[in-house]
Structure formats: structure tokens, C-alpha cells
Image (spheres, helix red, strand yellow):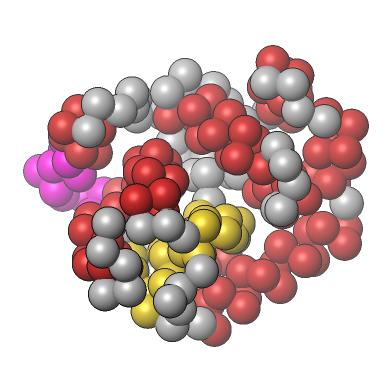
Amino acid sequence: MPQHIEFVYDFCSPNAFLAQKMISDIAAKHEVGVTYVPVLLATVFKATNNQSPFKAFSENRQKTAYLTRDLHRFARHRGLSFHMSPHFPMNTKFAMRAALLASGKPWENRYIASIFDAIWVHGQKVDDLGVLCDILQDNGLPIRKLREAMTNLNVKQNLKNQTKAMVKRGVFGVPSMFVDTEMFFGKNSLANLELELSRFHTP
């Protein structure tokens, strides 16, 4: 019986945002926990010779328009608030370093939800440290600890190491989710992830 879902993410991904909105309910339904694993998506792409579909199909307007419509449709059908960020693509290295510090803390879920919502609901520019600190303050998060983590060299290296470890496990993009050794990629794999969990638990 799996004890948890590993949810591999970077705040810069709209697909990771939408999957994150669903994962807690899925975990609760199947009586497992969620372990959040922050990574640097740019480093994942570089290590796996991959790239964002918006970049890969940037010269195909029909394809990129469809990708955007699919994001909005996914959110609409599930009653989720979502707006394509006016700052996409963005650099989330500071937010992801802080996410590593947040790992396992009682306020980790609040931090993750706050940053995801700031980007994909409210359209805020989180690669601006001033904006990022305002978000932390508005959500009652420990600003000093998180601000220090954003520029801490050890945290920076540990995030790189964690990213490399996830690549070694097979991660090539986000969101990626693990149930034991089985990996599920993308928001559209959530149904298959549930089927995998159903093998161990009948709700």
C-alpha cells in the first residue's frame, strides 16, 4: 500500500498549477499523503533535451492556441480559477528555493498555494523579490526565513541536487507524480494515477 504521492513541480508551469489544485482531493480520497518535490524546470529541460510545449510549438499558432484553450477548459470543467500569466514564461528560481525550505513545514501547503495562486490566478510577477515578499506577508508566511533561503548558496545547491535526482528517476517535465516507482506525467495523467491508487484502495 503506497503511503504518499510524490508531486514534482515548478511554479512556472500552468499544468503543475492545475494538477496541484486536484492532488490533495485525490490523495484524501485514496487515503494517502502528498509529498511535494520542488525542482527547477529549466534544469530538467536542459538535462533531458526537452522544452516547454509553448516554446516547442511557438511557430504553430494553432497548436499554441489549442494548448491555452485546453488549460482554460481543464480549469473551467473543474471549477478552478485560472488566468494565463501575463509574465509567462518566468524565472521562478527564488520561489523554488523558498519552496525547498518550506518542504515538510506546517505551512508548506499554504506557501505552495500562495505562490501558485499569485501567478496563475492573480497574475503577479514572482521573479520580482519585492512582489514575492509582499505575497509572503499577505499570507502570513515567515518572510525572513524564506527571504534568506532565496539567496542562500546551500539551498541553491540542494535544489539543483534534488532536480538532478528527479531527472535520474525519469522526470522530464512537470507536473510529474510518483506512486511508488510508477511515474505519471502531466495534468491529464491524473485519471491514470487514480486508477493506480485504486489497485491498493477501494474508496
Locate the N terminus and report the quarter of the image it occupies. bottom left
**Which one is nearer the viewer's eye here, 3 or 189?**
3
Q: Position of residue 137 (x, y in %)?
A: 75, 19
At 26% from the left and 75% from the top, the residue drawn is 199
At 76% from the left and 28% from the top, the residue drawn is 141
Q: For the magenta stretch, what is the residue range?
A: 56-70
The answer to whether residue 23 shows anywhere in this view is: no
Q: Is residue 126 left or right of residue 24?
A: right
In the rendered image, the residue lying farthest to the left is 62
How many labels were placed on the picture?
0
Q: Main secondary structure of the magenta part?
A: helix
Q: Position of residue 122 (x, y in %)?
A: 47, 19
Q: Is residue 23 above or below residue 196?
A: above
Asked whether residue 64 is drawn in magenta, I would say: yes
Q: Position of residue 39 (x, y in %)?
A: 59, 60
Locate the C terminus and report the quarter of the image it occupies. bottom left
Q: Is residue 109 left or right of residue 189?
A: right
At 54% from the left and 84% from the top, the residue drawn is 168
